[in-house]
Amino acid sequence: MKELETAPVLMCANCSAPLQGHFCHECGQSIHSVLRPMAHLLEDAGDIFFHMDERIVHTVPPLFTKPGFLTLEYFSGRRVRYIAPFRLMFVFCLMAFFFVHVAVNGTHFSGHGDSTSKEALGAFAAAGTADEVHELYDDQIRDLRRTESDPAVPGLAKMGIATARGQIRDSANKRLQELGAPLLAAEPEPAAPAQGTPKVTVGWTSEADLLDEHNTVAIGWLPDAVNQRLTASLGRLRNNIRQARHPGPEQDEAIHRIVEGVFGVLPLTMFVMVPVFALLLKVFYLFRRRLYMEHLIVALHSHAFLFLGLLLLMLLGFARSALAPHVGIAATAIGLVQWAIAIWMPVYLLVMQKRVYRQGWPMTILKYWLIGSVYFWLLMFALLIAMVIGLTH
C-alpha cells in the first residue's frame, strides 16, 4: 500500500502564516505576486475597469430615479454592487463645481462684455460723423444697461458689463478724436449715501475702516503669526475690492482671482456641510433610534443626487446655448428638460425622506420644511464665508 504524503503548506511571504486560500487570514496579503508578465497586469486592469463600470451602472440610474433606494440597500447590507456613498458624493461634487466654474468664467470673460465691446469697436471705426458715433454709443450703452438690469444675469457678469461700458466709451472717444470732435465725458461715480444713511458694515467695522490701509488685525488671544497672516489676507481683500469696483483690465484680474478663490473652497465647504446636514437629521429624528452613521449615509446620498442634478443642469445648459442659434426647437426641448430636473430635485428629497424614515406624510412634510429651512440658512452662512475667503485670494 502506498503511503500517504502530507500536502505542502504554503506560507505567507509577509507574515509567514499558513495560507488557507488566495489571501492571508492574518495580514490580508494576496497570494499572487506583483512580479508577473505584463499581459497579466493588463488583464487585472481590465477587470478592475469593467467592475467599476458595472458598479456605475448599478448606482447612478437608481440614484437619480429611485429616491431612497441606494440608502435602503446600504441599510440592508447590500453594498458591494454599488459605489460607496462618500466616493459618489465626492466625484459628483467636483464635477458639478467644475462645470459651474466653467460656466461662470464663460459668462464673465467671454460673454456679454467681450462680444459687445468687439462689435462696438468695429461699428465706431465705420462711423463717418460725430453724430453717428454718439448714436452708436447710446445704442450700445442702452443694450448693456438693459442686460445689466436683468435679474437672471449673475453678479460677476454684471461687473464684466461695467468693464464693457468703459471699453465702449474708450472706443467711441478714439473715433471722436480721429474726427476732431469733443470727447465723451466719463460716467459719473455712484451717488454718495444721503446724510443720515448708515454706513455699510462688514463684521465689526465700517466699509471705510475695512478699506483703510492703516488698519490691521490685532486679536489679543491669537498668536502674532496668525494676526500677521490675517492682516495679509485683509490686504488682499482690500486690493480685490478696489480693483473689482473700477472698470478696466485690473477689474477682470480681480474678478478672476475672486472666482478662483471661491471655487477653490466650495468643495471643502460642502464636505463640511454634509455632516452638519446629518446632524440635523439626527436631531429631527431623535426618537427613531437610528445611528448617526445612518443619517450620514442619507446625507451623502442626498447631496450626491443634488450634485448629479446640478451637473446635468449645467451640461444641458451648455447644449442649449450651443443649439439655440441653430435649432430653436431642440433648445426649447432642452429647456423643458431642465425645468423638469429642477422640479424633480426637491420632490426627490421629500420622497426619499418619506421612504427612509417611514413616517406619515404630514410629519414628513413638516420635518422636510423645517430641516430644509434650517439647512438653507446654514448653507448661506457657509457660502458667505467661502465668498469672504475668495475675496482674500
Image: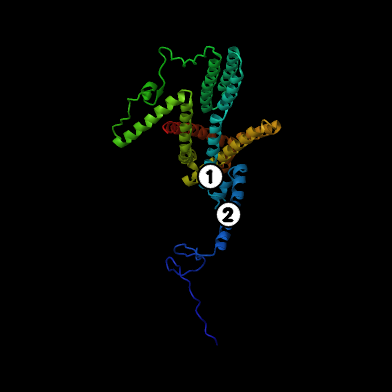
Q: Nearer the viewer, residue 111 or 375?
A: 111
Q: Is residue 118 above or below residue 23?
A: above
Looking at the rendered structure, the secondary structure element under dot 2 is helix
Q: Is residue 264 above or below residue 239?
A: below
- Residue 111 position in % (x across, y down): 57, 29
Number of marks in the rendered image = 2
Quadrant placement of the N terminus: bottom right
Q: Nearer the viewer, residue 329 or 121?
A: 121
- Residue 307 position in % (x across, y down): 55, 39
| Residue located 32% across and 36% down the image | 226
Characterize the local packing of mark 2: few (<14), some (14-19) or many (20 or more) Cα atoms within 10 angstroms: few
Residue at far bottom of view: 1
Instruction: Point out which mark residue 38 bears.
Output: none
Q: Is residue 167 above or below residue 378?
A: above
Quick check: 296 left or right of 341? left
| Residue located 58% across and 44% down the image | 68
Looking at the rendered structure, the secondary structure element under dot 1 is helix
Q: To which residue does mark 1 refer?
A: 91
Quick check: 70 left or right of 15? right
- Residue 43 position in % (x across, y down): 58, 60
| Residue located 55% across and 46% down the image | 71
| Residue located 53% across and 35% down the image | 101
Snapshot quadrant of residue 235: top left
- Colour style of the rendered protein structure: rainbow
Nearer the N terminus, badge 1 or badge 2?
A: 2
Residue type at mark 1 is: Val
- Residue 206 position in % (x across, y down): 38, 22
Q: Is residue 360 visible?
A: no
Quadrant placement of the C terminus: top left
Q: To which residue does mark 2 refer?
A: 49
Q: Is residue 106 visible?
A: yes
Q: Is residue 191 above or below residue 96?
A: above
